[in-house]
Amino acid sequence: MNTGDNLLDRVLASLGAQALETGMAHGILVLQIAPDSLVPVVGRLKREFGFDLFLDVTATDWPQRRPRFDVVYHFYSTRDFVRVRVKTRVEEADPTVDTLVPLYGSARYMERECHEMYGICFRGNDDLRPLLLYEGFVGHPLRKDYPKQKEQPLVPYRDVKP
Amino acid sequence: MSATTPVPRQQKSAAFEYLTTRKDEFVGWARKFSLFPYPFVTACCAMEFMSVSSTLYDTDRFGAALPRFTPRQSDLLMVVGTVSHKQAPILRKVYEQMCEPKWVIAFGVCATSGGFYQNYAALPGIDKIIPVDLYIPGCPPRPEMVIDGIMKLQDKIAGARHPIINQDF
């Protein structure tokens, strides 16, 4: 049985070479990796270190930065009660990362949400239909350049007399 | 038993044998005490709706307690909570399924104006898509405000014209 800190130390020692940057944030191990090494790294996290629960995938938009987007993954170990955060950077021109559906089935829905909100494409996920939004919605509302109050109503508005 | 006692004739009293009223007042009086709400409940205002419906505040006193869960049997549409753009077609369809006469209450600030949801997702007030008779602000509104709103709606119904035959029928 690993204690949490030992596990994170071992993860760091084992995967640190593939990470561009590492750190700790609020007790979470943070690994910054290249998009190409996402699936191998996550596969090792799952198989060798027991991170069996896929918590979330989301993105961060840095409009002034190149590459513009961080894709952020969180994993949890239900055996050791520790979390690890994996970040990877993608360009605005080609915001594509590989899907994690073969590793975690729950990634299917979370990647759908990340796709509609940030426009991140997940290569290999065949179901990226809108989840919370609707067909016909143009743009990605959680990107910083989406106008804050822009609406895309489905029902035409009434003519309200002043 | 020699003889049956004759049944006394019904005595007619002099007072209140009939009364006169205007048709609109009479129909309005009848309609204002038989509001059958359809709760279109989408968000956290539902808690306040339950509170105002149940014993302590008791909208049954106003004849507005029995919710009908089909729009065809109801005549008061209570839109309780945030309506998103994705849900707007459903609200529109529910409103169109209701028979005349019908009234609409926007319950809470989200249904009234969108509240603090001024973004891509939320409809900024249900009056953008359906006509609203009464707005109850508040996040959520106090039960007293809801009762005040129902009474105001009753006043509105009582004072309105009620054509028995209109252009639709």
Image (cartoon, rainbow, N blue to C red):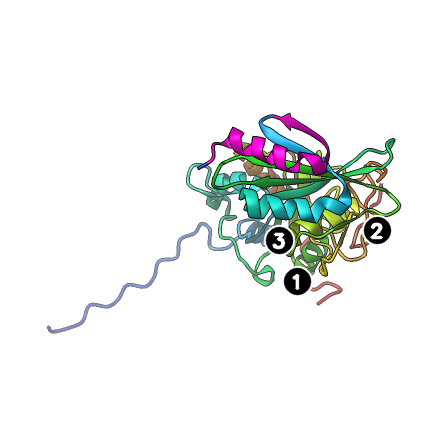
Magenta residue span:
A2-25
What residue is rendered at 76% in x and 51% in y? B129
SS state under label 2 = loop
Dot 1 falls on which chain?
B
Dot 2 falls on which chain?
A
Image coords of residue A11 (percent x, y): 60, 36
- CA gap between label 2 and label 3 equals 31 Å
- Judged left or right of residue A5, residue B118 is right
- The amino acid type found where label 1 is placed reads Gln
SS state under label 1 = helix
Q: Quadrant of the N terminus of chain B?
A: bottom left
Q: Quadrant of the C terminus of chain B?
A: bottom right
- The amino acid type found where label 2 is placed reads Val
Image coords of residue B63 (percent x, y): 50, 48
Residue A43 or residue A138, whichever sits in front: A43
- CA gap between label 2 and label 1 equals 30 Å
- Which residue position holds label 1? B97
Q: For the residues carrying marks 2 and 3, which lies nearer the camera in this image?
A: 3
- Which residue position holds label 2? A138
Q: Residues within 10 Å of mark 1 (few under 14, many from 20)?
A: some
Question: Is there any visible trace of residue A51 in the rendered image?
Answer: no
Image coords of residue B157 (percent x, y): 63, 47
- Which residue position holds label 3? A103
Q: For the residues carrying marks 3 and 1, which lies nearer the camera in this image?
A: 3
Residue B111 or residue B84, whichever sits in front: B84
Labels 2 and 1 share a subunit = no
What residue is rendered at 57% in x and 37% in y? B146
- CA gap between label 3 and label 1 equals 47 Å
